[in-house]
Amino acid sequence: MDDIPLGALFGALAFLIVLSAFFSGSETGLMTLNRYRLRHLARTRHAGARRAQKLLERPDRLIGLILLGNNFVNILASSLTTVIALRLGGEAAIAVGAGLLTLVILIFAEVTPKTLAALHPERVAFPAAFVYAPLLWILYPLVWMVNTVANALLKMLGVRQEDGTSDALSQEELRTVVMEAGAMIPKRHQDMLLNIIDLEKVTVEDIMVPRKEIIGIDLNDNWDDIVRQITISQYTRLPVFRDSIDHVVGFVHLRKVIPLLMRNKLDQETLEGLIKEPLFIPEGTPLNRQLLNFQRERRRIGLVVDEYGDILGLATLEDILEEVVGEFTTDPATSIRDYTPEADGSFLVSGSASIRDLNRALDMELPTDGPKTLNGMVLEYLEDIPQPGTSMLLSGYPVDIVQTRGNLVKTLRIHTNQRRPVAPEADR
């Protein structure tokens, strides 16, 4: 060692520090790779991604290989530093050399490369994978021995390799990923993805047309009234019943009815022949399940029933899709009736308005785990039928009762721009 020039020793030391930086940076890069993006790139036959994915299938072997190389390089660098220190200043210089080497390794072989790899993992990990693949094959016996001893120690401590965390995301974790995607996913698409995730939390009761608002054809009406109902209908599918919706017969598609009506070939017997049997939907059915049910049954509309078989309302495929993409139809009968903006920033709202629709349309945060309509929420809160002029706070929103009719709250004024803080434990 005394015959080797100092320049060669310094060159070898610099090379070892570069190797140490490579091992440190590549370890961080490989371990911080986005596993989902890595799988996507691997499926597109990206060479670096495929090699990195194969290495990460056995992280214990990869870590063993990296640490084996890193520790070997650092120990060899420490030995060279000792030799250089003895050549330059004797034994007194060994402590100085150790301190300088520690500082150099910390800055140039640890902090800098690991920070770079954490910021740009793919740029570091994919090239490194081309080095580690053959290196693992060459050093496999040594890596296997190290891993065997390490796994045995972990097993003694009650830790098994199979106990590692899964890459599968929970529903809330997936929600967080979507919300933090930022500019990578447009805001509109983020909202749609979040709505899809929430479909199982929403039931058909939340989106159905209430029983009293169902429009249909009463076969016991005179024929002129039935024809008039068909010609003025805003919908393509109508329920058909006798006397009331409780005696429903089925549904009729007006696209099959109108051509016959225009050719004067429609009579009551023909109309009844076009009726398709009704589809009944149990209350509490999640929207994701009902969407699949509609697809399986090849239907687009159904009647929601309770545990006693009583009809509660009507749900359609369009209503479910609107939960995902937002409203894509214009229905003057509902949009004008449900809420009207006032000059002072408040809104006149119908008591029959759906809470979910108000939250979406007016950017409100009313609770959706209780009553489905604003009228129901007011009655539950007051436990009485309020008189016009009554004021209250619902989830921090000042609400004034404008008009009542019988046992219903018909019209309210909500001051959405005057919301007050709500205590965390308060529901309303």
Image: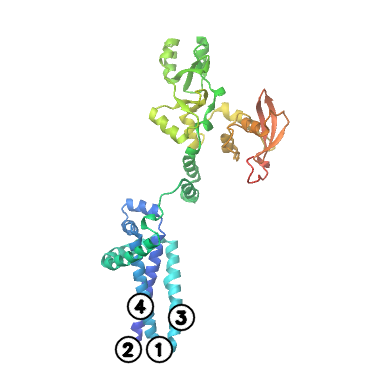
Read off the residue under disc 1. 88
Q: Mark 4 points at which residue?
A: 76
Q: Is residue 30 visible?
A: yes
Question: Few, some or many C-alpha atoms within 10 Å of disc 1 (few <14, some 14-19, many ≥20)?
Answer: few
* Residue highlighted by disc 3: 99
- Measuring 42% from the left and 89% from the top, which residue is drawn there? 91
Residue 178 at x, y percent in the picture: 47, 48
Q: Position of residue 164 (x, y in %)?
A: 39, 56
Q: Sequence-wise, which precedes: disc 2 or disc 3?
A: 2
Q: Mark 2 points at which residue?
A: 2
Dot 1 amino acid type: Leu
Q: Pointers 1 and 3 in contact (CB under 8 A)?
A: no
Q: Nearer the viewer, residue 96 or 3?
A: 96
Secondary structure under tag 2 reads loop
Question: Callout 3 environment at 10 Å: few (<14), some (14 to 19), or many (20+)?
Answer: few
Q: Which of marks 4 and 2 is nearer the N terminus?
A: 2
Q: Are marks 4 and 2 in contact (CB under 8 Å)?
A: no
Q: Which residue is drawn at 67% across and 31% down?
A: 383
Q: Which of marks 4 and 1 is nearer the N terminus?
A: 4
72 lies above or below 327: below
Whether residue 110 is situated above or below residue 286 in the rendered picture: below
